[in-house]
Image (cartoon, grey):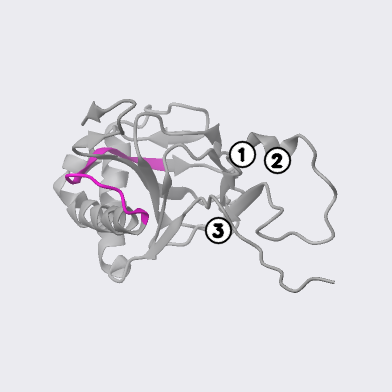
Amino acid sequence: MFSNIEVAQLFPTCVWLHDLADAATINPLLLAEVRRLWDSEPSRAKVEGTWQSSGDLCRNPVFEPLVNAAAEAAMGAIRYLAWQCQGLQITDMWANINYQGHGARPHVHPNNFLAGVYYLQVPPDAGELVLYDPRPQTQVLAPLVTQRNIANMTRHGIPPREGRMVLFPAWLLHSVVPNRSPVERISVAFNLALKGTVGGESGRVQF
């Protein structure tokens, strides 16, 4: 009936997964520093069941290896996307401790280009990172499916793994499934912005 059939996969949303080769070396140092910060300010909880540090960990010398890894990963993403820029900067970096029964509601990271998370401590049943389809029109009609695949999914879960860094567009809606373990899930999140002129003829912004 058809002489040729092709499927064109258009408008992808890219997510990058990086496993740090030296995670076994740097993770204990980062964990110790996170716990030191927690001990110095245990009441710093933005939402129930979750402790967050201040957002200036990128200026903490202990986190320098993670800052360098995040910058290298982001530059790889920028090259892949062929973005033109004069460099990048980490706008903020903070630690998260999720206690049993707690995660994060769907949210985005405004005023940034890329967002990321790095996992320091992941107990069993720690809860996954959930990424949502950024095309709201797909929910206008949602047929039942016989099998989930990349073409019909409206959300995708990424299991956390110690030593893994996940990088994604800062505008991508995401959440964190509540931690079902009695052991804390500990991660470090960060945001990145481009340096230089952003935008075309219709509007340019200097970062």
Pointers 1 and 2 in contact (C-beta within 8 Å): yes
Residue 94 percent location from the top left of the image:
32, 39
Image quarter of residue 73: bottom left
Please give the range of residues in magenta: 81-96
| Horizontal arrangement in the rendering, residue 117 relative to residue 1 (left or right) | left
CA gap, disc 1 and disc 2: 6 Å
Residue 79 percent location from the top left of the image:
29, 57
Residue 184 percent location from the top left of the image:
48, 48
> Element under label 3?
loop
Q: Residue at x 71, y 72 (%)?
A: 4
The numbered dot on residue 135 is: 1
Amino acid at dot 2: Thr
Residue 36 percent location from the top left of the image:
26, 43
Q: Residues within 10 Å of mark 3 (few under 14, many from 20)?
A: some
The numbered dot on residue 42 is: none
The number of callouts visible is: 3
| Residue holding disc 2 | 138
- In the rendered view, would you say 40 is above or below 32? above
Pointers 2 and 3 in contact (C-beta within 8 Å): no
- In the rendered view, would you say 48 is above or below 115? above
**Disc on the earlier residue, 2 or 3:** 2
Residue 134 covered by magenta stretch: no
Amino acid at dot 3: Pro
User: Viewer-proximal residue, 110 or 127?
Assistant: 110
Residue 90 covered by magenta stretch: yes
| Residue holding disc 3 | 159
Amino acid at dot 1: Arg
**Disc on the earlier residue, 3 or 1:** 1
